[in-house]
Amino acid sequence: MLSHRCAALGTDGVRALREAGYRAGVTILAAVDDRPEQLEMIDFWKRMNDAFRTAGLGSIRFEMVSPAIGAIAWKGSTEASGTRSERPGVQCHFAAGLLGGVFSRAAGKTVDVLEIRCGAGGDQPCWFLLGAVTNMRSVHAARQTAARSGPGDRTSTVPTPPRHAPGTTS
Ligand SMILES: [Zn+2]
């Protein structure tokens, strides 16, 4: 659906998708709780996951990659679900915008969101990294370096998911 046209969208189209996603994220967060900063971490993530499922948006799981960078595995996002074949590269612009809306509003400051691995067309979730704009600069820089060096080692910039995720009981 959305994702099928991404290649033809151009920069303006991508930005429009992200902005629409951002607004959706703000709306979802407001529906989950009007004072998210007062929720315990575990309650926040449980409520977010419930809200995503209820809205038919799939499921999300949060993990810390470093003290400054978090990762979200999002399974079954609207864009990824609408794509049948695996396609390399970033494509879930609406989803990235949505996460940005949720977490920028929850944190009270701009949170930068970057899709680092898209699961569209496969069984794997889409992986997003998020953090404060300044903290994400090194992530963007690493990805640009990897892009210049060619497609030989695409996995090298994907952080290893942490062994322990806060708020999980498994
Ligand atoms: Zn994706």
Image (cartoon, rainbow, N blue to C red):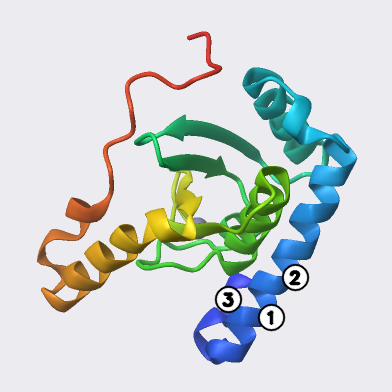
Residue 12 in the image: state x and y as whole percent: 61, 90
Q: Amino acid at mark 1?
A: Ala
Q: Earlier along the polypeptide chain: callout 3 or callout 1?
A: 3
Q: Is residue 157 above or below residue 42?
A: below
**Mark 2: which secondary structure?**
helix
Q: Is mark 1 within 8 Å of ligand 1?
A: no
Label 1 sits on residue? 16
Task: Report the quarter where the N terminus lies.
Answer: bottom right
**What is the spatial separation of the Cα atoms under label 3 and label 1, in whole angstroms?**
15 Å
Q: Amino acid at mark 3?
A: His
The residue that appears at 18% across and 71% down in the rendered structure is 145
Label 3 sits on residue? 4
Label 2 sits on residue? 20
Q: Amino acid at mark 2?
A: Ala
Quarter of the image where one finds residue 94? bottom right
Answer whether labels 1 and 2 touch (C-beta < 8 Å). Answer: yes
**What is the spatial separation of the Cα atoms under label 3 and label 2, in whole angstroms?**
17 Å
**Mark 1: which secondary structure?**
helix
Q: Nearer the viewer, mark 3 or mark 2?
A: 2
The residue that appears at 77% across and 26% down in the rendered structure is 38
**What is the spatial separation of the Cα atoms under label 1 and label 2, in whole angstroms?**
6 Å
Q: Is residue 116 visible?
A: no
113 sits left or right of 99 in the view: left
Residue 101 in the image: state x and y as whole percent: 70, 57
Quarter of the image where one finds residue 83? bottom right
Would you call the spot at circle 1 few (<14 residues within 10 Å), some (14-19), or many (20 or more)?
some
Most foreground residue, 86 or 162: 162
Quarter of the image where one finds residue 18? bottom right
Residue 162 in the image: state x and y as whole percent: 33, 28
